[in-house]
Image (cartoon, rainbow, N blue to C red):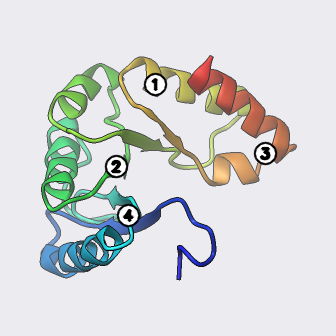
Amino acid sequence: MAARLGADAVVCMAFPGKDDEEVSLRKLVALIDEAEEIGMPVIAESIPGGWGGPVPWDAKNIALAARICVEVGADAIKTPAPENLAEMKLLVDNCEAPIFILGGPKKDSEDEVVKYAADVVAAGANGIAFGRNTWLAQDPTEMTRRLAKAVHG
């Protein structure tokens, strides 16, 4: 269906470290198998322990969760960044796929969003995958332009 709609890739959430991690990882693997048949890249949205789960989103757990998703075949990773961006190197060094960082909660200002995008890329991320901080901006089109400049220069 994604290919018929013109998608360039598909995204599947995975929760390595969650008590029932095998449920999301099996779904990810099934999607990867199906997507490989038509050459469609799969982006794993890797959330260590799930949303609000018991697993801390520190560099070690983020890197481990991303690594698991890549090892089962994900082509790219969409994940939170460690709180301390200096620890991003652990994620980058242990993930053999492009890494896109989530935007997280709504930021206080649009300038803060743009700075965060630039900071995560400077720390080693390949790009960003921001949602609410883009579409809830005063001018989403202008915010998209500013984010593209922050990421790509």
Residue type pointed to by label 4: Gly
The answer for how far apart the CA atoms under marks 1 and 4 are is 27 Å
Count residues near mark 4 (Cα–Cα under 10 Å), then give few for <14, some for 14-19, many for 20+.
few
Question: Relative to residue 51, is residue 93 drawn left or right?
Answer: left
Q: Position of residue 54 (x, y in %)?
A: 20, 62
Count residues near mark 1 (Cα–Cα under 10 Å), then give few for <14, some for 14-19, many for 20+.
many
- Looking at the image, is mark 2 or mark 3 earlier in the sequence? 2
Which residue occupies the foreground of this view, 130 or 44?
A: 44
Residue type pointed to by label 1: Val
- Looking at the image, is mark 4 or mark 2 earlier in the sequence? 4
Residue type pointed to by label 3: Ala
Report the disc number at residue 71.
none
The residue depicted at 63 percent of the width and 40 percent of the height is 107
As drawn, 118 above or below 10:
above
Q: Which residue is mark 3?
A: 137
Q: What SS does tag 1 mark?
A: helix
Q: Which residue is mark 4?
A: 39
- Looking at the image, is mark 4 or mark 3 earlier in the sequence? 4
Q: Position of residue 64 (x, y in %)?
A: 13, 47
Which residue occupies the foreground of this view, 29 or 46?
A: 29
- Observer-side mark, 4 or 3, equals 4
The answer for how far apart the CA atoms under marks 2 and 3 are is 26 Å
The answer for how far apart the CA atoms under marks 2 and 1 are is 15 Å
Q: Which residue is mark 2?
A: 76
Q: What SS does tag 2 mark?
A: strand
Question: Relative to residue 74, is residue 135 drawn left or right?
Answer: right
- Observer-side mark, 2 or 1, equals 2
- Looking at the image, is mark 2 or mark 1 earlier in the sequence? 2
Q: Which residue is mark 1?
A: 121
Q: Position of residue 27 (x, y in %)?
A: 26, 79
Count residues near mark 2 (Cα–Cα under 10 Å), then give few for <14, some for 14-19, many for 20+.
many
